[in-house]
Image (spheres, rainbow, N blue to C red):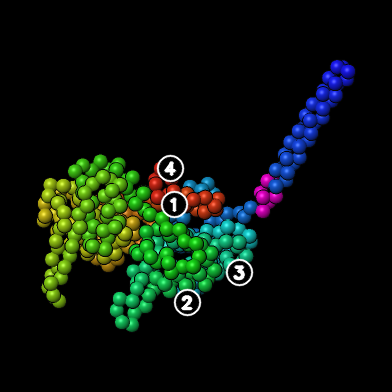
């Protein structure tokens, strides 16, 4: 009886082990099948670039360890834009990189690229705008004016964009003009890291006007400095602006921050007012360097030591020893990777999550 019982127990154990092994084999086959199925169904990623900022697009592609897609963007003799993709984009997760700073051809070129991608059956089209042009007209502040920020949102959506990726909008509420997913990056994570390497001591951060206080405060908090505001007022028409400095700049180095520099009038005047109030060395950091009209001459003739910009736009301005450009290619490259992988993009608000390449 004892021998029979031991035999039965041994047989039962062997049977259990065999069952477990069979179950593990079945699970392995199931996982293998579904991983192959998912791999076969995964959308390929494609990166294409318009002509507004090919240098930045190439750096983004380098960060992602992949080439830019093969496409031809050209003009007919009358200036009309033509786009032709020279590789299959059917079923792809497609990212089109194009800043929409003037001239208006940059915006039109992006719209045509989106339309061509949609008609070529791309699975998802993400418009990557390092600089979102026409954003300054974001409300009806005077009679009979356009709201171009909303108009551009409508154009991008109607053309076929499924998602928008951009950086440092002139007004953050422009995100609300879209009914498609919208990812908004901040260049401050890149600029602040660069400023830290400059070793500026006894530093304060200043906003050149009241509208830029929120941005300046984020820099001040990150750098652990005080905040200063340049409040400009015009007592009456045809009377020069009066600059009031809110905060202490006497004997301190000052960093003026803004989202963009266009003609540089506000920036240069603010720097002069800060110097007259006792500021020592004055620097500036801005995301988008439009630098139109007299901007370069104003900067060169100003009291500014250095103007730090990102490479979000390429303009035809003259070179200047006072300009220093910091790339945001790693920031955009990591954002594109995370969007493709369906990972969080908000973690890129911390520079520690951006890989250096």
- Cα distance between the residues tagged 3 and 1: 31 Å
The image shows residue 212 at horizontal and vertical percentages of 27, 60
Main secondary structure of the magenta stretch: helix
* Circle 3 residue: 119
Give the extent of the magenta segment. Answer: 35-41
Q: Which residue is mark 2?
A: 78
Q: Give the farthest residue toward the bottom.
A: 144
Q: Secondary structure beneath disc 4?
A: loop
Determine whether 154 is above or below 321 in the image: below
Which mark sits nearer the N-terminus, 2 or 1?
Answer: 2
Q: Nearer the viewer, mark 1 or mark 4?
A: 1
Q: Which residue is mark 1?
A: 346
The residue sitting at 30% across, 47% down in the picture is 222
Q: Specify whether residue 354 is painted magenta.
A: no
Q: Is residue 299 left or right of residue 260?
A: left
- How packed mark 1 is, by other alpha carbons closer than 10 Å (few <14, some 14-19, many 20 or more), is few
Q: Work out whether 75 lies above or below 96.
A: below
Q: Residue at x 47, y 52 (%)?
A: 345
Rounded to the nearest whole Å, what is the CA distance between mark 4 and mark 3?
36 Å
- Measured Cα–Cα span from mark 2 to mark 4: 43 Å
Could you tell me if residue 323 is visible in this image?
no
Badge 4 local density, few (<14 within 10 Å), some, or many (20+)?
A: few
């Amino acid at each position: 009886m004892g021998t029979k019982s031991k035999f039965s127990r041994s047989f039962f154990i062997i049977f259990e082990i065999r069952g477990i092994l069979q179950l593990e084999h079945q699970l392995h086959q199931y996982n293998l099948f579904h991983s192959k199925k998912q791999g076969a169904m995964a959308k390929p990623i494609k990166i294409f670039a318009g002509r507004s900022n090919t240098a930045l697009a190439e750096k983004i592609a380098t960060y992602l360890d992949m080439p830019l897609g093969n496409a031809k963007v050209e003009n007919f003799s009358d200036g009309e834009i033509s786009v032709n993709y020279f590789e299959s984009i059917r079923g792809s997760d497609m990212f089109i990189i194009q800043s929409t700073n003037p001239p208006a051809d940059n915006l039109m070129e992006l719209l045509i690229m989106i339309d061509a991608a949609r008609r070529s059956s791309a699975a998802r089209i993400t418009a990557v705008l390092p600089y979102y042009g026409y954003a300054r007209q974001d409300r009806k502040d005077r009679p009979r004016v356009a709201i171009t920020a909303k108009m551009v949102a409508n154009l991008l959506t109607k053309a076929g964009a499924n998602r928008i990726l951009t950086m440092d909008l002139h007004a953050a509420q422009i995100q609300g003009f879209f009914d498609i997913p919208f990812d908004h990056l901040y260049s401050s994570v890149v600029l602040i890291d660069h400023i830290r390497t400059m070793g500026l001591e006894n530093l304060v951060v200043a906003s050149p006007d009241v509208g830029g206080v929120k941005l300046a405060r984020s820099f001040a908090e990150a750098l652990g400095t005080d905040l200063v505001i340049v409040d400009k007022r015009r007592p009456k028409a045809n009377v020069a602006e009066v600059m009031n400095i809110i905060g202490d700049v006497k004997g301190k180095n000052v960093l003026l921050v803004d989202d963009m520099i266009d003609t540089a009038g506000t920036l240069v005047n603010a720097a002069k007012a800060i110097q007259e109030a006792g500021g020592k060395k004055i620097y500036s950091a801005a995301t988008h360097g439009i630098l139109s009209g007299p901007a370069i001459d104003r900067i060169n003739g100003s009291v500014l030591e250095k103007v730090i910009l990102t490479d979000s736009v390429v303009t035809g301005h003259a070179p200047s020893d006072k300009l220093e450009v910091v790339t945001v290619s790693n920031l955009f490259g990591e954002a594109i990777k995370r969007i493709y992988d369906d990972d969080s993009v908000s973690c890129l608000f911390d520079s520690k999550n951006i890989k250096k390449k």
